[in-house]
Amino acid sequence: MGSIYRPKYRAADGSLREAAVWWLKYRVHGRVVRESSGTTSYEEAKRLLKLREGRAAEGRPVAPHADRVTVAELAEDLRNDYRANGRRSLERLEHSLGHLLPFFGSRRASQVTSADVRAYVAQRQREGAANATINRELAALKRMFTLGLDAEKIHRRPKIVPLKEQNVRRGFFEREQFEAVRAHLPDYARPIVTFAYITGWRVRSEILPLQWHQVDFAAGTVRLEPGTTKNDEGRVFVMTPELRACLEAQREATTALEQRLGVVIPWVFHRNGRPLKSIQRAWRTACRRAGLPGRLLHDFRRTAVRNLERAGVPRAVAMKMVGHKTEAIYRRYAIVDEAMLREAAEKLAVAQAARAKFWATWPPDGEDGVLEVVGTVVGREGIEPPTPGFSVLCSTD
């Protein structure tokens, strides 16, 4: 059995005094461990002692300083986890931590409650943050505590409930809008947005790093290798005539530049032979001049999905082409716009008119007709028994 005590010390005047903070004494594998409880409350110190003894009796590692671990320490563990697993969203994580740590960083992880999490959410909402942004931050906070529990640095985590997101994607480009923006872009950026408009690939992480060895003109394909995409899966896009023309023109311009500079340029898209990290500044300027301020490069991803839907491409194939791993994510991008709704309404009107015309002239004069379709007998008022001696087999037309 362990014990709780207040260590004695000799004061400056030579008197023997008792410390205000309670200390714990217990055994782990036969070894005596003494640990400060960090509290002047006897009940709290007793609770900590029972916790330590319980873990020691179960043979689980005892973390003497679990109640002192701060959120900032858990955040550093989360960074290390991202680095160890090669997560490309480390930059996004740092953005989340930039909001989380000023609020939670100096607090002990054991003292963070669900009420504290709700207070953080309320503060971020007052600052104007969208629910989707707050949820990314809450996900990082939850992951911190999960890693802390797995490493047995902490013994509990607060309940973290995500907010409801209004994450339906709405931005996409009609062809004339795309042409208007492209006309205001500098020459080096035009083939980039053309490629994005057709393929829907991510500009920064998938299109700008693209190299010529990934382009096969003979096979008519462009390839992303496994591990280079967001979901780590490879991808192949078969060239359309427009995409081939874009890439062939880019190849011709690149070859001419290589001959003039005397260097090899491995990148498909570049600026005077130098790789591009971003075209955001040129993009924003072009959108403003085209009368479409605030549009995003990511809108091309939604546009490509919509174009594939319009073309009747099977969903499984479209997901492979654009790079969506799950149907849930794909459906967020598969926007049904007004033009598609009008087209559907026109198809419905044509079908209804054809049915109305058929039944207006059925049955033929003097005949007590019954329509038989693949074994099902259907009359003017619905399903009827067949009339002896008369039936019509109708095609799907």
Image: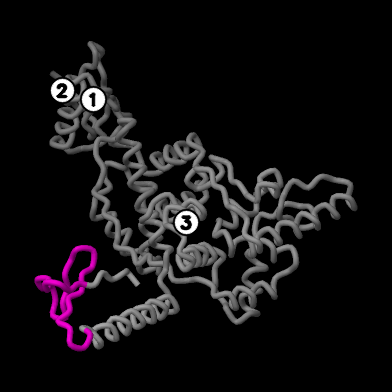
Q: CA distance from mark 2 to mark 3?
A: 66 Å
Can you see residue 387? yes
Q: Is residue 19 above or below residue 303?
A: above
Q: Secondary structure at mark 1?
A: loop
Q: Is residue 188 above or below residue 210?
A: below
Mark 3 and mark 1 lie on one chain; the one further toward the N terminus is 1
Other-residue count near label 3 (Cα within 10 Å), few / some / many at <14 / 14–19 / ≥20: some
* Residue at (25, 47) in percent of width and height: 158
Q: Residue furthest top?
A: 30
- Type of the residue with mark 3: Ala
State which quarter of the image contains the N terminus: top left
What label does residue 7 carry, if any? 1
Tell which of 169 and 179 is nearer to you.
179
Instruction: Single out the mark in the foreground, 3 or 1.
Output: 3
Other-residue count near label 2 (Cα within 10 Å), few / some / many at <14 / 14–19 / ≥20: few
What label does residue 236 carry, if any? none
Instruction: Single out the mark in the foreground, 2 or 3.
Output: 3
Where in the figure is residue 112, as x and y percent of width and height? 28, 47
* Residue at (28, 25) in percent of width and height: 10
| Left or right, 388 with reference to 275 | left
Mark 2 and mark 3 lie on one chain; the one further toward the N terminus is 2
